[in-house]
Image (spheres, rainbow, N blue to C red):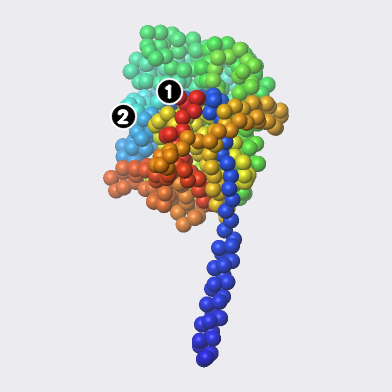
Amino acid sequence: MGCRQIWIIVLFLCVVQFLDCTVSSAVEETGTVSVYGRAAVGTIDEDFICATLDWWPPEKCDYGTCSWDHASILNLDLNNIILQNAIKAFAPLKIRIGGTLQDIVIYETPDQKQPCLPFTKNSSILFGYTQGCLPMRRWDELNAFFRKTGAKVIFGLNALSGRSIKPNGEAIGAWDYTNAESFIRFTAQNNHTIDGWELGNELCGSGVGARVAANQYAIDTINLRNIVNRVYKNVSPMPLVIGPGGFFEVDWFTEYLNKTEDSLNATTRHIYDLGPGVDEHLIEKILNPSYLDQEAITFRSVKNTIKKSSTKAVAWVGESGGAYNSGRNLVSNAFVYSFWYLDQLGMASLYDTKTYCRQSLIGGNYGLLNTTNFKPNPDYYSALIWRQLMGRKTLFTTFSGTKKIRSYTHCARQSKGITVLLMNLDNTTTVVAKVELNKTFSLRHTKHMKSYKRATSKLPQDPNGEIQREEYHLTAKDGNLHSQTMLLNGNALQVNSTGDLPPIEPIHINSTEPITIAPYSIVFVHMRSVVVPACA
C-alpha cells in the first residue's frame, strides 16, 4: 500500500471520527406539555397586538448610532406599499402614537397662537429637544392613512403642558388641557376616529426626566375623561381614556387607580426588562429562562394591584421594546429577539393583560419593520403568526422536561381547538414533546412559587390516525441568531417585488406523532381536534 493510500485512509478515519463527535453532540430529550383546559386564566383583546409610532427625529442617536431615520409620525412615508400591507395584514393593528417627546408637543389647531416649529436638538434642556409641533395637515394625512390600512389608533397627549419642572424633575401644577381639548375637538369634528386618548408618557412614579404626583395625575385624568365625554357626547363609540403610560411602581399606581375612580378604561405600563441597548449580554438574558421569568413578578403585581383597587380599568402594556435607547442592531431586529417578544406576549396574556404595544412598528433597532427599506424583521412575522393563530382565551400550561422550553397555550383563533406555542432556548437539544390535557388544576401563589394539582387525560385520537395538526416551525437563516431573515418550515419569509407579504402556511403532521422542537426554534401548533371546555 502506497503512502498516498495510507494518507487517504487516515484522512477518512479522521473525518468519520469528527462526524461521530458531531452526531454524538446532538442531544434529544422528551417532555410533556400539560394544558389546563377547564377554564381560561386570562382573556386578551381581539386586537391584542399593538405597535407604536414615535416622535423621534433623524437626529436621535444612541451610543453613537442613529437608527431612526425618517420613522417619526412627522416624516414617515405613508405611501410605502410594504408599510401599508404590513398594517393591513393584522386587520386590525392597534397603533399607539407616543413616546418621550409627546410631552413637549403642541398641536396646530385653529386657535393655537404659538408658531408650529419642528423639534430642534438641544442637549441642555428636558428630553434634549425644543418644543415640537403637529401640523393639522399632517394629522389629516395620518388619519387618511389609518383609515386606508384599518389601524386602530391610540394617541398619547402632552401631559406636561402648563406645569413647571423643578431641577429634581418634579412637575408642579395642574395639566393645562386647553390645546389638548382643542386638538380632540378638531379630531372629532373632522371625523377622525381615535380609539383611545392616553395622558402622558413615563411621568408616573419616579418618572423619566420629569414626574407628576399620583394625586395630581388622577385629577388630570378625570379632566381628560370630562373632555372626552363632552366632545364625544353624541359620537359612538366613545374613545377610551388611558394612562399613565409609564413604569410600574405599586404605591404610585395604587393611589392613581383608586383616585381616578371610573374615569380610566385602561392602565398602561412600559417594559424595558433587558436593560440598555448597549449591553453586550442581551442574548444571554434572552436565552436564560430564569431571567425571562423575572418579569412575571411585575405582571402579577399589576394584576393584583388592579384587583385590589376600586378601578374598572384593565391592564395594558403601552410600550415595550425590551432594550431601551433604541435597542441593539442585529439583536433587537434579528431572529433571537422573537424568543423574548413571544415570551412577553405569552406571559402578558397569562396575567390577563388585554393589549401589548411593541416599541416600535418602525424606528430604532427594535422596529417590527426595517427603518430604511420597510421590510419586516423577524418579530413582525412572529407577531403576525400570533395574531392568526392565538385566540383571546389563555389556558394555563406547564412543561415537564428541560427548563429551556417556554410553553403557552390559547384557544385557537381559527377553530374551536387550541394553539400551543413552544420555544426551545437550547442550542444543541432537540425536544420531542407530547401534549396532554389536565382536567383540573389549583393555582396557589406564594411570592415566587405556584403549586399544581393535576388530573390528566389523553388527547382524542382517531383510530385510523388520520387526524392532522398544523405546525409552524420558525428558525433563523443558516442557524444564525443574529439573522434578520426568519424561516417558516424551512422557507424564508420575504416580501416580493411588489411589496406583498409572503403566505403563512403550515405543515400538516399526523396527530399521533409527538411535536419536535429543534434547537433554537419556535413552534406554533394548531390542534383543531382538541376541544376543551374553555374553548368550546
Q: Residue furthest right?
A: 447
Q: Residue at x 50, y 25 (%)?
A: 534
Q: Tell me if mark 1 has few (under 14), some (14-19) or many (20+) residues whose alpha carbon lies within 10 angstroms of its own.
A: many
For disc 2, the marked residue is 148
Numbered tag placed on residue 107 in the rendering = 1
**SS of the residue under disc 1:** strand
On the question of residue 328 being in view, the answer is no
The quadrant in which residue 191 appears is top left
Q: Would residue 438 be visible to someone looking at this image? A: yes
Kindly identify which numbered label has been placed on residue 447: none
Q: Residue furthest left?
A: 498
467 or 220: nearer the viewer: 467
Residue drawn where x is 44% and y is 26% of the image: 46
Q: x%, y% of residue 507?
A: 39, 46
Q: Nearer the viewer, mark 1 or mark 2?
A: 2
189 sits left or right of 163 in the view: left
What percent of the width, then of the height, locates residue 268?
Answer: 55, 25
Residue 147, by quadrant, is top left
Q: Secondary structure at mark 2?
A: helix
CA distance for labels 1 and 2 = 23 Å
**Residue 34 image position (x, y, % from top left):** 57, 36
